[in-house]
Image: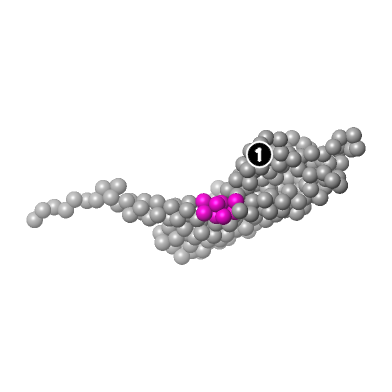
Amino acid sequence: MSEQRAPSAWEAYQPHLIELKRRLRIALVAYFAGAFALMSVADRLYAWLARPLVEALPQGSSLVFIGVPDVFFSYLKLSLVASLFLTSPITLYQLWAFIAPGLYQHERRMFLFVLTASVGLLVLGAAFAYFAVFPLVFRFFVGLAGDAIQAMPAVREYLSFALKMMFAFGLAFELPLMLMLAARAGLLNPDALARKRRFVVLWVFVLAALLTPPDVTSQVLLAVPTLLLFEIGLVLARLAARRAEAAKEGE
């Protein structure tokens, strides 16, 4: 009777890799199809994105483009970014369908919570930047020009500014979730972190200076909400740490 050969590591993981490639292919096809479809309405998307700036400009002023291909590449970039959000349900489902079969029931609930909460907080942070921060920042910037200088913001520069600000605020809104998860995993002591609050304040302003354009207004508008989110995160982290300790005692 011949001895059966044990499967190699590649043979053992090959079905999982094939499944991963299939789900990545579905997500990529959906993403590029979404970007292609959004190019047909990119002008309206850009008009919506630029509305806070346009409303702050003096009567008769508008955005301009300097380079010939600036408008096309701005529309393309906006379509690629918007497609991430448009096709995110498909992408997240593919990620969930690949990982969920290998998780226990309580791990599935936690993974689903983290997945939905992280996306929701990212969108909430970007919405806060658009609806609350942009009107204040643009009125301040445009007001600095006065009567002697005519405001003529460029299409390409505005898109980079807006996306950078929305991404920075989206990341800042993830802070409570990250603190809660770190405390639940035992990687963070909330009380020790609270005692180092002055260092946190310093680093928050440093990161705000790195993530936002070089002006004090944008930095403060990012740093102050981030510090408020830090305090909320500390409360959630303390609750998570207590639940983790209670679970260990129960075991």
Q: Residues within 10 Å of mark 1 (few under 14, many from 20)?
A: some
- Mark 1 is on which residue type? Asp
Residue 132 locus on image (x, y percent): 77, 52
Does residue 76 appear to the left or right of 132 in the view shown? left
Does residue 80 appear to the left or right of 127 in the view shown? left
- Report the number of numbered marks: 1
Does residue 132 appear to the left or right of 247 in the view shown? right
Colour mode? Answer: one colour
Residue located 63% across and 43% down the image: 72
Q: Secondary structure at mark 1?
A: helix
Residue 209 locus on image (x, y percent): 71, 37
In the picture as drawn, the residue positioned furthest to the right comes out as: 147
On the question of residue 175 being in view, the answer is no
In the picture as drawn, the residue positioned furthest to the left comes out as: 1
Residue located 13% across and 52% down the image: 3
Q: Where is 26 relative to 72, above or below?
A: below
Q: Is residue 182 magenta?
A: no
On the question of residue 23 being in view, the answer is yes
In the picture as drawn, the residue positioned furthest to the front comes out as: 68
Q: Where is 145 relative to 98, above or below?
A: above
Residue located 40% across and 51% down the image: 21
Q: Where is 201 relative to 55, above or below?
A: above
Does residue 127 appear to the left or right of 98 in the view shown? right
Region in magenta: 31-39
Toward which corner of the image does residue 168 lie, by quadrant?
Answer: top right
Quick one: quadrant of the N terminus?
bottom left
Toward which corner of the image does residue 208 lie, by quadrant?
Answer: top right
Main secondary structure of the magenta stretch: helix
Q: What residue would you read off at disc 1? A: 70
Q: Which one is nearer the viewer's eye here, 119 or 56?
A: 56
Residue 56 locus on image (x, y percent): 82, 47
Q: Which one is nearer the viewer's eye here, 39 or 200?
A: 39
